[in-house]
Image (tube, rainbow, N blue to C red):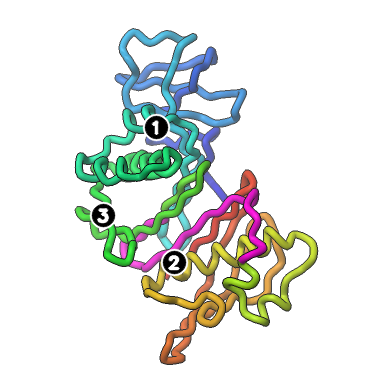
Amino acid sequence: MADQKSDDPLSSSVFVIINGTSDYCQEGFSVCAWSAHTGFSYIARQAPPNHKQTHLFIYMALYFRKKLDNKAEIAVWQVTETEEELKNIASVPTDEMEDIMLFRSESQRRQKLAVRALLNEVFEEKMYLNHHDNGQPYLENCVTNISITHTDKYVAIIIHDEEELGIDIESLDRDFSAVEKKALSEDEIDDLEKEKRNEQLAIYWCAKEAIFKRMSQNRVDFAEQIEVEKFNVRKEGELEATFIHKDEHEEDFELEYMIFDRHVLVWLVG
C-alpha cells in the first residue's frame, strides 16, 4: 500500500542514519544517510555542529507517506526516539508542550511529541494543533481536516482539505478478545473465524474506532450502531461498514486497511 517508504526517501526530505557509520552527504544544514541495519532512513532539518560520521545522533523516522486517489494523505512515524530527542526535533508550541507534559506516562508524552514531529514533516508551515471538547483534533491555522492515531511504536495521521476523516492503529501484540463482547454485533460474532481471530478482532476494532472518529459523536454503541460487513484478513484490503444513527438513519462507508510490522491501520475518507 505504501508508495513512499523510509528506504525510498521523499524528494523533499533529507535523510540521515542514527548512530551510524554509513556513508552520508551534507546539503546545506542537513545530513543524509540510510541505515542498512534497520532498513529505515532518517531525516534531519539541521546537522549538529562539528558532527562526525561515526557519531551521528540524528533521528526522525518517517515510516511511510502515501497520497490516496481521493486526495487524502496518510503519514506514519515510527517512534524510535527518546523523549528528549523528540523535544529537540518536534518544535512544539509552548502551550501545546505544557499540555503534553501533563501526561504522567513517558510513552504517552513520546507519542504526542511524535505526532508533532510528523506534522512538522508533512506541513511546510508550522501547524497549531488543538482539540474540540469531544476530543476531535483540528488545526487552528489551517482548513485541512485531520485525524490522528498512535500506539507505543507508531503514530499516524490522515489529512484532507475537504472530507471528514477517521484513522486508527493498533498493535497485534494486544489481546483483542474483549472486543467480541464489547463492540461486535451478533452477526459480526458469527462471522469470526478460528484462524487469525485476533487479527480479525483488531481490524473490527480499528474500523469502528475510525468510524467513531469520523462521526465525532458522543455515546456511540459500537455493537449496535456500527456494523462492519464480513471480510477475510489479508495484508491489505477494503471494508464496508454502516453507521446507524439513533434516529435509525443509516450511513454507509468504505474503509481501507493494511497490516505492517505487527500493527493494523484502518482509515476512511468522506
**CA separation in Å, label 2 and label 1:** 32 Å
Q: Earlier in the sequence, mark 3 or mark 2?
A: 3
Q: Is residue 243 visible?
A: yes
Q: Which mark is residue 269?
A: 2
From the top left corner, tell me how far across and down residue 135 is, in percent. Answer: 33, 62
**Of discs 3 and 1, which sits in the foreground?**
1
Residue 6 is one of the magenta-drawn residues:
no
Mark 3 closeness class: few <14, some 14–19, many ≥20 residues within 10 Å: few
The amino acid at mark 2 is Val
Q: Which residue is mark 3?
A: 130
**CA separation in Å, label 3 and label 1:** 21 Å
From the top left corner, tell me how far across and down residue 41 is, in percent. Answer: 51, 29
Q: Earlier in the sequence, mark 3 or mark 1?
A: 1
Q: CB atoms at circles 3 and 2 under 8 Å apart?
A: no
Q: Is residue 242 above or below residue 134?
A: below
Seen at 20% across and 44% down, the residue is 95
Seen at 79% across and 61% down, the residue is 195
Q: Which residue is mark 1?
A: 83
**Of discs 3 and 2, which sits in the foreground?**
3
Quadrant of the rendered image containing residue 84: top left
Q: Is residue 246 above or below residue 269?
A: below
Work out whether residue 222 or residue 203 is closer to the camera in this orientation and state it: 222
Label 1: state its secondary structure.
Answer: helix
Residue 171 is one of the magenta-drawn residues:
yes
